[in-house]
Amino acid sequence: MAFALVATLSLTAACASGSPAGESRPTAESAALGVSTATAAEQPLPSRSFAASLPEGYRIETVLDGLELPTSIAALPDGRLLITEQVAGRVRVVEDGRLLDEPWFELPVFVQTESFAVQELGLVTIAADPAFDENGYVYIYYTEQREGDEGRTVFARLREVDGRGAELTPLVTIDLAPVKSHIAGGIAFQDGAILLGVGDHEDHSLAPQLASPAGKVLRIDRDGEAPANNPFADREGADPRVYAYGLRNPFGVAVDPATGQAYITENRDVEGDAVYELVAGADYGWPAHRVAFRTPLVVYDRPMGLAGITAYQDDALPAFTGDLFFCSFHTGGALHWLQTGELDPLAEAHRERVIASGCGSGVAAGADGFIYYLDFDAGRLLRISRS
């Protein structure tokens, strides 16, 4: 299979119904994106995702290119960025705007080579521990080879030693073998614990089952154990790591560092892709319902492939402070700005807007306070800065 086809389509299953392989995708500027901000979660209503200009003085810059299928960004306190490459299994380093030749870490990953054009296996996500300066911990989510032609999903911890990733320590291992997708992989930190989004691994029946980690958000400590105050820690037969359930493919997880509120991007079948507040013990309804029992912040009536998400709390871009930013793959790559504060009723329909094209996978705020995002198809790192 030609690499150009791989680069265009390999994350197409991020939302899972998806378009047939090879179908063209509209650009962010021209797409009519079906979206609803209605309060009735049971009935998503068709609307539009409005395109919007950046605030005055803000600009989009290409930082660098040359990445191979980049999927996720981790910002380190010293200004470096770590970026995962899906199929190469590499963690690349961006320092002072340059892509270093030497990977920070590299490992073999499992992908289905015969059906690669429509899959999201491989090295999917990365996140730095909030206490990175003290412990040097970085976490990755990936698929690895097991016996035969099947893979399994692993969430692991690394520690930086002499500027490189070392001491690979698996914390969560999921012995399921999805053909191509639905492993999710969102990683965030809340009150000293790790929140990990785990997809249903193409077995929808597992999402509502509390005994399975699939189709859930897990809450674990730095050693992979369940905190005693998890909502199902004392439920007989339940996996004590489960924090929320009934999910299909929660590709993105974010926590607002100012409020502690957690958010997820969830991908449903055909319609119902949405952004939700993450609530302890909540059932998000998959596979029984196309939209969760919880009211979404925004919900779409067409496949969007919602990917990485970040909650922005910095003063470098003050117009964005307190708001959410997330990527969508199926629109040709788009960066969405979701305002979380109170709006004038006349402005409510414009709460969620597309402000840039090309954001198909990961987004994060850097140590400089600027917003960095990845163009998966083009292998580029871009950022929103301010003059």
Image (cartoon, helix red, strand yellow):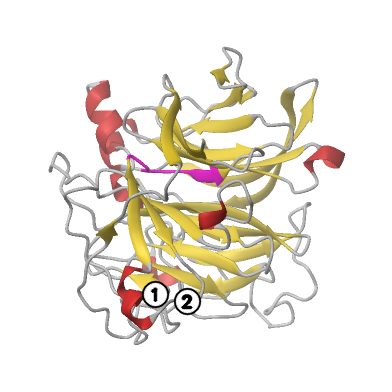
Q: Is residue 143 visible?
A: no
Query: Dividing the image into 4 quarters, which one contains the N terminus?
Result: top left
Provide the secondary structure element on which disc 1 rests.
loop
Name the residue tied to disc 2: 208
Q: Residue 346: where, in percent of width, then height? A: 32, 79
Q: Which residue occupies 27% across, 84% down?
A: 43
Query: Taking 38 as reference, is 150 left or right?
Result: right
Q: Main secondary structure of the magenta part?
A: loop
Kind of residue sitting beneath label 1? Trp
Furthest-top residue in this view: 101
Out of 218 and 274, give the one closest to the viewer.
274
Q: Residue 127: where, in percent of width, then height? A: 63, 44
- The tag on residue 384 is none
Q: Are marks 2 and 1 in contact (CB under 8 Å)?
A: yes
Q: Which residues are magenta?
A: 358-364
Q: Residue 81: where, in percent of width, then height? A: 61, 32
Query: Magenta includes 136?
Result: no
Relative to 380, is 273 above or below?
Answer: below
Name the residue tied to disc 1: 286
Kind of residue sitting beneath label 2? Pro
Q: Is residue 44 visible?
A: yes
Relative to 332, is 251 above or below?
Answer: below
Among the two numbered marks 2 and 1 on one chain, the one whose residue lies closer to the N terminus: 2
Q: Which residue occupies 60% across, 32% down?
A: 82
- Whole-angstrom CA distance, mark 2 to mark 1, is 7 Å
